[in-house]
Amino acid sequence: MISEKMVALVKNSSVIRAMFEEGKRLSELYGAENVFDFSLGNPSVEPPEEIKKALTCVINEESPNLVHGYMNNSGYEDVREAVAEHINKEHGTDFHAQNIVMTVGAAGGLNVILKTLLNPGDEVIVFAPFFGEYRNYVSNFDGELVVVSPDTTSFQPNLLEFEQKITAKTKAVIVNTPNNPTGVVYSRQTVEELAAILHKKQRELKTSIYLISDEPYRELAYDGVEVPYLTKYYSNTIVGYSFSKSLSLPGERIGYLAIPGEIDDFENVVQAANVANRILGYVNAPSLIQRAVARCLDAKVSLEHYNRNRELLYHTLADYGYECVKPQGAFYLFVKALEEDDREFAERAKKYNLLIVPGSSFGCPGYCRIAYCVDYAMIERSLPKFKELAEEYK
């Protein structure tokens, strides 16, 4: 018999993944060209050419014992130094190899840092809407997730409620900007106000509160919008990064934690993160892709494809009467459901072979997420179906 904890997790398995599997089933019934799967944030843009060249070079030029061998749990020293120098160049920070822990994607990094920080019963605050797996990552280590309700006028964090929900048990706060599922970027003013609240609460409570910035979409920002780098505003910030979106490598599972030397208890946090990496079973980030991305830190996927999709989908759905949040980053469109029950709305959309994800999965009922990291032609084919769905409600 499986554990009671896993029984509940299996029963409430990811809605996003379930919708993805539903897409495959519908494709077999109606043909892939007639199914419009907007469920999963799976990049449709090819990785930059630099990645393919780097993989070949690593295999052909570097020692097999180095590329395929054991290493420090934090990753290769030279890779971590290259990542640190790249962050310094981009954001004016002062990182070195000892500040970087290479991880198995952002998800692996979040689990490593939560394992490092949490005691049973410690609280982790998130801002709705939030990536639903945060709930599971926190419960993995017997923490308690505290949700700040959404501000559906701007989808910037509800800072008044946030301040009220910080307690002596608050160990960490997770933020995600550009945001999944809204595409909203937290403004510099928001970040400054959030940091001021955290500094104030640390003094009042005489405790350390760590701000964990989950940043897989940092490079996917449109119209020149600024994405503030949070370590510059709050000293107890830890950054979790993934190359899944910036280099279109989600299946390679490669990312890092950036842990500034200024955070409270730095030496112990870094050592504990190394141990967590090992005992959680990752041991270290995949070796070949570590060495490859170190050669491609200045490479980025083209935003032209995503921006074209964004403009077509946003403006057309708005014309059809949908209330949409125009994304500033990432590749998601957050749309108000045309009825109160967003889950029922997503079910009704399936009648038109439209696969979208209910906002309830992100702690924000009444909305749905549309992932537009798909082919432009699929969006064009889907638009009449979105129109028919809207007309059904009229």
Image: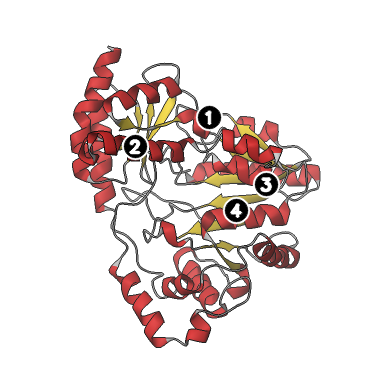
Q: Quadrant of residue 285?
A: bottom right
Marks 4 and 3, how far apart in space? 11 Å
- Report the front residue among 392 and 312: 392
The residue at which mark 3 appears reads as 140
Q: Residue 308: percent from the left, percent from the top?
A: 23, 45
Q: Nearer the viewer, mark 1 or mark 3?
A: 3
Residue sitting at the far right = 206
The reply, left or right, for residue 44 in relation to residue 193 is left
* Amino acid type at image mark 1: Pro
- N-term mark: 1 or 3: 3
* Amino acid type at image mark 3: Asn
Marks 2 and 4, how far apart in space? 32 Å
Q: Nearer the viewer, mark 2 or mark 3?
A: 2
Marks 1 and 3, how far apart in space? 25 Å
Q: Nearer the viewer, mark 2 or mark 4?
A: 2
Q: Nearer the viewer, mark 4 or mark 1?
A: 4
Q: Quadrant of the C terminus?
A: top left
Which structural element holds mark 2?
helix
The residue at which mark 1 appears reads as 150
Q: Residue 219: percent from the left, percent from the top?
A: 39, 56
- N-term mark: 4 or 1: 4
The residue at which mark 4 appears reads as 110
Q: Residues within 10 Å of mark 1 (few under 14, many from 20)?
A: some
The residue at which mark 2 appears reads as 25
* Amino acid type at image mark 2: Arg
